[in-house]
Image (spheres, rainbow, N blue to C red):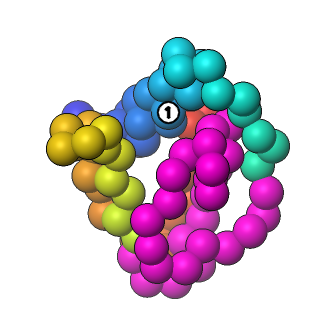
Amino acid sequence: MNKKVLIKVFFMMMLLLSVSVGSSVLAASNSSLSNGTYTVGEEISAGLKEFHISEGTATIRISRGTEIFLNESLDSDKYYYSD
């Protein structure tokens, strides 16, 4: 599957999940994240549509319990967005 299509599917799943569990969507911010694990709707807004990796790589892993929905490694060469 094309990487851009996979990213779009990933963000649509995030949005659908946030709506289906009844959580409110927070406005996206321009904050930076360091290494760690973040929860959508808590540390990361559920309406996140665009992000940029300034240098290095980032791994995005979407899971619920032990079920992994997405595990993707991205580099700093490109922007990734849901449009």
Report the amino acid beneath label 1. Answer: Met
Is residue 56 inside the magenta stretch?
yes
In the rendered image, the quadrant that contains the N terminus is: top left
The kind of secondary structure element at disc 1 is helix
Where does the magenta region start and end? Answer: 29-57
User: What secondary structure prevails in the magenta region?
Assistant: loop
Give the answer, above or below, for where 26 lies relative to 12.
Answer: below
Q: Which residue is mark 1?
A: 14
Residue furthest to the top: 20
Please state the horizontal and vertical placement of residue 6, each as a whole percent of the image.
35, 37
Q: Residue at x 56, y 37 (%)?
A: 82
Give the answer, above or below, for where 37 lies relative to 21.
Answer: below
Please state the horizontal and vertical placement of residue 79, each as a whole percent of the image.
56, 59
Please name whichever residue, 24 or 73, is drawn nearer the observer in this view of the structure: 24
The reply, left or right, for residue 62 in relation to residue 13 is left
Q: Residue at x 26, y 52 (%)?
A: 71
Please name whichever residue, 58 or 3, is drawn nearer the observer in this view of the structure: 58
Please name whichever residue, 26 or 77, is drawn nearer the observer in this view of the structure: 26
Give the answer, above or below, for where 71 lies relative to 30.
Answer: above
Q: How many residues crowd mark 1 within 10 Å: few (<14), some (14–19), many (20+)?
A: many
Q: Residue at x 50, y 33 (%)?
A: 14
Tag count in the figure? Answer: 1
